Amino acid sequence: MSRLVAATNYESPSRQPFPGSLTDRELASLDRIGSVVLLARDQTIFSEGDSARYFYKVIAGAVRSCRLLADGRRHICEFFLPGDFIALDADDIHHFSAEAVADTTLKRYPRSSLDQLTSVEPRVAKGLRSLICLRLLAAQQHLVLLGRKNAVERIASFLLEMAERNGDADHISLPMTRGDIADHLGLTTETVSRTFSHLRAQGVIELEGAANVLLMDNPALEELAEVA
Amino acid sequence: MSRLVAATNYESPSRQPFPGSLTDRELASLDRIGSVVLLARDQTIFSEGDSARYFYKVIAGAVRSCRLLADGRRHICEFFLPGDFIALDADDIHHFSAEAVADTTLKRYPRSSLDQLTSVEPRVAKGLRSLICLRLLAAQQHLVLLGRKNAVERIASFLLEMAERNGDADHISLPMTRGDIADHLGLTTETVSRTFSHLRAQGVIELEGAANVLLMDNPALEELAEVA
DNA sequence: CGCGCGCTTGACTAACTTCAAAGATGGTGG
DNA sequence: CCACCATCTTTGAAGTTAGTCAAGCGCGCG
């Protein structure tokens, strides 16, 4: 287990993570009561079934949300990157577990303060609903990926999504392992690795170590992703 | 194309479709301004990209929401049954198309009236958020199904879900075709059909025609579904 | 510097898809 | 009312993709 240090990569950019999201100004009153949480790689933030007393914002690092089948098969529903909120959609209990993908810094807020804020401030309630709708939209896009795309299309789609969320159109840092990517895309570690190699052989991407990907030909990638 | 008649199957039950959903009482003011829409099988309600001026409630029949890839591959994100709301999560435009699976009756409401209601009545805003969160939860469960379950597990999970939504624990009417089911579960028509036959051979289900399924052994089905 | 974990690659296997054709089903028109 | 036809479903056989099993490589941490 790596020593817990302040995560230095993936600093929170000043961009809005999503259009229509809550602005920092609207959350200013929350920031006062939010506390900072430092996590080492693979550390659990909460587990499926835990009571949901807090929600979180990623400051640096990355988080995965997982669901497990009875025999241990795992699916990663989402990766949360700096600026993203975690567990805004929870009811009384969490329906998935959340773990740090790398050394990670979070801001933690009590859910009660959110309820209070939304009941007083309808504008915030609307912003919150927009955020959740965007998550639903993303989930539905992922359904198409898992239901109908082949391995190359899945990896191409994933790389383009990560590039867009990074804010950098052609350089991606991947904080998660090949196994994490596999469990997010419904593949195996080996197939993910093979597909990366395949895309590199085609000249569409270049790899600098395992974690850094350069997108050499975005139009080709979009072609491969079979975007709707 | 079948003649458009008032749909007689799948009448709206008096149950609450979801816990935490909007009650009929809370929507009473909407009901006055809602208008009834009758649809023949395969008729389009709205298409991806259309401006979202209305939302809908299924009264009788069934609706599918679809997304398409560039080359025509289709994924059905959700089936909407009597009592379910459609397009509560839309922003300005629809991000999927909606079509009648069978002859269907809908109630249609202007979105503006919903915005009005939520801004005046925070309780409704909260109920709406709960409904959308439940949809997100369902989508995430479906991600696990598509990402990690095999054909038998997918069909077993689907049958159990339909039984629960039907309200009848062991008799299911399936208004949709095998092809629709396949596009919902990320399989082909042939694999769906073969898997039904397989489950029948095991004595877990019985088929009365293609559309009526009797669940003969729920514990076995739940075992096969690999519920988390 | 060495060890461990994660990544890559290869050979083989299994599951699902594809292609093909026959068998039900139900709606329509004579 | 019955027969026909289109459509959906079922089943079989061959093909393809991704999974499994296994082994070597390389980066990074200690």
Image (tube, coloured by chain):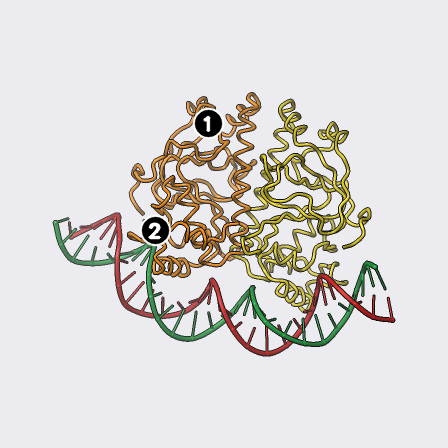
Chain colours: A yellow, B orange, C red, D green
Residue at 34% in and 51% down:
B216
Mark 1 or 2, closer to the camera: 2
- In primary-sequence order, the first of circles 1 and 2 is 1
Residue B55 picture location, percent across and down: 47, 33
Q: Amino acid at mark 2?
A: Met
Q: Nearer the viewer, residue A33 or B139?
A: A33
Between A132 and A50, which is closer to the camera in this rendering? A50
> Residue A55: x and y, percent?
67, 36
Mark 1: secondary structure? loop
Q: Mark 1: few, some, or many residues within 10 Å (few <14, many ≥20)?
A: some
Left or right placement of residue A228 versus residue A107 in this view: left
Residue tagged by mark 2?
Answer: B216
A37 sits left or right of A160 in the view: right
Instruction: Name the spot of residue B191 as percent of width and height, x first.
Output: 42, 60
Count of labels shown?
Answer: 2
Q: Which mark is residue A26?
A: none
Up/down of B102 relative to B123, above or below: below
Chain letter for the residue marked with disc 1 in the picture: B
Compared to residue A183, the image places residue C10 above or below, namely below
**Label 2 SS:** loop
The subunit carrying tag 2 is B
Gap in Å between the C-alphas at discs 1 and 2?
A: 34 Å
Q: In the shown orientation, is residue A87 left or right of residue D11?
A: right
Residue A22: image location, x then y, percent: 68, 33
Per the rendering, the mark at residue B23 is 1
Is residue A129 placed above or below B155 in the rendered structure?
A: above
Q: Amino acid at mark 1?
A: Thr
**Circle 2 crowding by C-alpha within 10 Å: few under 14, some 14–19, many from 20:** some
**Mark 1–mark 2 CB contact (< 8 Å):** no
